[in-house]
Image (cartoon, grey):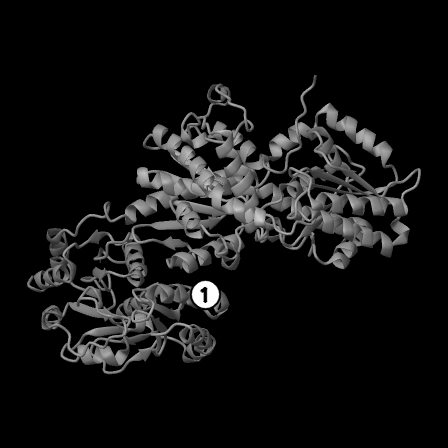
Amino acid sequence: MSSIRKAGGMNEGPHRSVRRCLGKQSRIRIDRANDTGWEGNVGERRDDAGDAYDMLTVFCSDKDFDGHYSHFCKQMLWPVFHYQIPDNPKSKAYEDHSWKYYVKVNQAFADKIIQNWKRGDVIWIHDYHLLLVPGMIRKKLPEAKIGFFLHVAFPSSEVFRCLAVRKELLEGMLGANLIGFQIQEYTRHFLLTCSRILTVEATPEGIQLEDRFVDVVHSAIGIDPVSLNKHREENEVKKWLAIMQERYQGKKLIVARDKLDHVRGVRQKLLAYELFLNKNPEWRENTVLIQVALSAGEPTELDAAVSDIVTRVNSTWANLAYQPVVYLKQDIDYAQYLALLSIADALMITSQREGMNLTSHEYLFCQDGKIYPNKKHGSLILSEFTGTSSLFGRNELSVNPWDYRQCADAIKQALEMSEEEKTRRWEKLYQSVAHQTGSHWFTEFLSHLDRSYEEQHKRDQTYVPRLSMSSVTAKYAGSQRRLFILDYEGTLVSWGPVNQIIPVSPQRTLDVLNDLLLDDRNTVYVMSGRRPEELDRVFRRVPNLGLIAENGCFLKDCGSEEWVAMADADQITNWKESVKPIMQYYLERTPGTHVEERRCSLLFHYNNAEDYESASRQASDCASHVNDACESLRVHAVATDGAIVVEPLDWTKCTAAQRVFEQLGEHMKSDETHKQPVDFLMVVGDGREDEKVFRWANNLGDQNQIKNVITVSLGSRSTEAAATLTQGVSGVLNCLQRLASVS
C-alpha cells in the first residue's frame, strides 16, 4: 500500500521553514522546549514520538484534547478570529465547559516546557491553540525568552470583546517578550484591544505593562521555494501535468483549494462563477472551475448548499464532453496539487477572513513556466480580506467575496487579460513571494526576539543599577556646561491629582533649584504636564529657571518672561473639535466624571465617579474610541491614574528637550576650551512621558554629542534610564543638593 503525501499550503509553511532554518542555525537546539508541537490523533498515544521526531511529547486525554481543540478552539476561537461570532446554543454551551479543557491543555504544554527549560533556550509558541502558554511560563520562568506568533487574523476589539474570557486570553499572550502577527492591521487591532480591555498603555511599538514592555510586530510568513522547486521536478508531477493537459485541452482552468467552512468563501466563489457563466455565454464550454474542498468535519448545512450549487451549475451547462465545475470534496496528493497550480490559468481565493493564504504564494511560484512552459504567468483572483492581499500591492485582482458581480467580472478579466499585462502583474507578485519566504520570516522573527529580549532586560528595574553619587559628582565637577532636565510631578514634588492646582510648591524644592542656578555653568529646565500659568505661579521665586509645560507644548526659556507655543494652534483646535464629542458621549453615561480642557490636551477624569469600576471601563472605551477614530489627527489617548489624557503626538517632552538642546548649541558655540555646547546632561523623571526623554538623552551620549549623560528613573516600572533612585522625591532633592554644593 502506497502512502499519500497530502497537499501543502495550509499549515506547511512554519514546519518547512523551521526545518530548513534549524539546519543553518546551530544556536537553536531542537531537543529542548523550542520544538514542542502537535503530532498524532485523538485516541493515539505515541510513546515513541519524542525519539522519532526529536521533540518533547505532551500527552493529554481524549476528553481534554476534544474539549480543547474540537470545542473551544474550533467552535469559539476560530470563528471569533475570523469575524464570525458564535451565537448558536451549541457554541454557548461549549464555551462554558470547554474553557477548562483549553486551560488544562495549555497548562500541560507550559509544564512540559518549564520542566525542560535551560537558561539560554528560546521558547517560540504558535497560534490560537496555545494563547495562555506564554503567561503560564512567565509566572514560573520570569527570565525566559518567549516569542508568540499568531498565524490567523486578529479581529477588531468590538469582535474580540464578545469572548467571555477575553482578559485571560490577552494576559496569556502578554506573557511573551515579542508578539507577532501577519500584517499591520492585525497588530493595530491587538494594540487597541489591549488598550480597551486591559486599560494598558499601547504604543506603536507594543504594550507597556506595569513591570515590563512587550514588543508587538508584524511579519508575514511565506513558503519554502527550495523545497517546492525540488518537489515539482518529480516524475509524479509531470505525469499529472500530462493527464490534465489531455483532459482539459482547449479549456481555461480556474483552480481553487479550500477548507469547506464558512470562512473560506467556497459558496460565494461558486455563486460568482455561476453568475459569470450566466453573463458570458461565450465562455461556456471553454472554462472549467476545479474546486478542491477539504472536509472541515461533520457534514453541515454549508456542505449541502455547496453541493446544490455545483449540481445546479453542472445540470444547466454540462454535456457529454463538458463539465463546468469539477468538485472534489477530498484532498489531493502533493503531486496533483503542484500539477494543478502549474497548469491553471487562474487561482481564485474568496476567503471572508484569512491570515496568510500560502496557496496563492505556491501558485505564483509554480507559474514561472519552468515545468510547464505552455501556461505561465496566470492571474490571481484574491479576496481583499486575506492578509496576503496587503503584501501584493494590488497587482492581484482584488475582490470582495460578498460582491458576486465584482467576482464574476474578475473571472472574465483574468481569462481575457493580455499576455503583457499578465506578465507584468506576475513579475511584481513573484518578487513579493520570493522575498517574503518562510526562511526570511523565521530568521526575522527570531532576530527581533533577541533584540526585544535584550532591550527589555536593559529596562528591567532589577537590572538597572542604582545611581552612583560618587560617579555623578565626579562627572559634574569635571564639566563646564551642564544641562538639567527635571520632571516636576512625582520627581521634584510628591504626586498629586492630575487636575489639582498646587499654589505653593514645597520650599525645599525651590531652595534646591535656586542653589543649582547659583552656578552660572548650570542650565535647569523643569518639565510638567501642567498649564503654563500653574508653573509660573509655583516657580515665580526661581529666577533663570527654564520651564516646559503641558508635556512639551509650551516652552519658557531660562531668564525669559514669555512662553513660546511649540504646538500648532490650528491643529490643536482641529483635533479638539473631533475629540470633544466623543468625550461628551462617555461623560453623559458616567456619573461623577468630568472633562478638563487644557490648551493642548483634554482630560477625562473618573477618579470621583459614583461607580469606579464601571467608569474605568467607560474610560478605557473612550480611549480606544479616540485612538481609533482620530488616528489621522496625530493624537493619542493614554490612561493615567484616574484619568484619560488625550494629547498630540507631535509635541512631547522629548521634542521640547531637543529644542532646548538645539538652542543651547546656537548660543554656546564650541571653542578650544569647550568642545561641546553641553558636556553634562542629567535627566530625572518617573513617568511614561519621561521615558522618551531618557531615550533621547541616551542616544546623545551614544553618539558622543554630549560627554556625560546621566538618566535617572524613580518609577517602579521598566525604564530606559541608565540608573534608578529608590528614595523618591527626597532622594532626588538630596542628589541635586549635593551637586549644588560642589564648587
What SS does tag 1 mark?
helix
Q: Nearer the viewer, residue 597 or 94?
A: 94
Q: Which residue occupies 17% across, 80% down?
A: 540
Residue 279 at least partly seen: yes
Q: Which residue is mark 1?
A: 627
Neighbor class of circle 1 (other Cα within 10 Å; few <14, some 14-19, many 20+) is many
Asked if one can make out residue 369 in the rendered structure from this viewpoint, the answer is: no
On screen, residue 415 versus residue 40, left or right, reads: right
Q: Nearer the viewer, residue 659 or 263?
A: 263
**Image side of residue 403 versus residue 555, left or right:** right
**Image quadrant where one finds the C terminus:** bottom left
The x and y percentages for residue 11 are 58, 37
Report the quarter where the N terminus lies: top right
Question: Label 1 is placed on what type of residue?
Answer: Asn
Q: Residue 348 appears at what percent x and percent y?
A: 72, 47
Res 537 → quadrant: bottom left
Can you say whether 23 is above or below 512 in the image?
Answer: above
Q: Residue at x 73, y 31 (%)?
A: 336
